[in-house]
Image: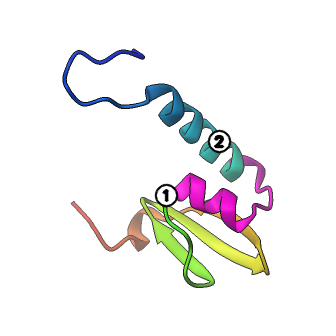
Amino acid sequence: WLEENNNEKADMHALRQRLELTSLAIETGAPLTTSEITQLIGVRPTSSKTERGGLIANRLSRNVWKLTRAEKDSTYWRN
């Protein structure tokens, strides 16, 4: 599963690692730095609460964040 046959090159190992780290951060509730949150959600948080891709980053204090899953009914985009 690490190799792709088409022209698009995706680093599947890095993607899997990012997903595993995101899951671990949510399960443990460990405090994270702004840099770590940026790596996990793919954008730098710009306010005390940033939501992206079903994840919510809440700022606890300066440079300390907690990552949680968004409620299914609270997201803007619905099918």
Label 2: how many Cα within 10 Å (few below 14, some 14–19, many 20+) = some
Q: Is residue 39 magenta?
A: yes
Q: Of discs 2 and 1, which sits in the foreground?
A: 1
Tag on residue 50?
Answer: none
Tag on residue 21?
Answer: 2
Range shown magenta: 27-42
Determine whether, in the image, residue 50 is placed left or right of residue 32: left
Give the image's coloring scheme.
rainbow
Q: Position of residue 30 (x, y in %)?
A: 80, 56
Quarter of the figure that contains the N terminus: top left
Q: Is residue 59 magenta?
A: no
Which residue is more in the foreground, 42 or 50? 42
Q: Residue furthest bottom?
A: 47
Do callouts 2 and 1 mark residues in contact (Cβ within 8 Å)?
A: no
Element type at mark 2: helix
Residue at 76% of width from left, 56% of height from top?
Answer: 29
Vertical side of 18 occupied by 30: above or below = below
Residue at 58% of width from left, 53% of height from top?
Answer: 40
Which residue is more in the foreground, 2 or 75? 2
Vertical side of 58 occupied by 48: above or below = below
Residue at 70% of width from left, 77% of height from top?
Answer: 59
Structural distance between the alpha carbons of marks 2 and 1: 13 Å
Which of the 4 image quarters holds residue 65?
bottom right
Quarter of the figure that contains the C terminus: bottom left
Element type at mark 1: loop
Q: Main secondary structure of the magenta part?
A: helix
Vertical side of 69 occupied by 49: above or below = below
Dot 1 corresponds to which residue?
42
- Mark 2 residue type: Leu
Vertical side of 48 occupied by 50: above or below = above
Q: Position of residue 78 (x, y in %)?
A: 26, 65
Which residue is more in the foreground, 17 or 72? 17
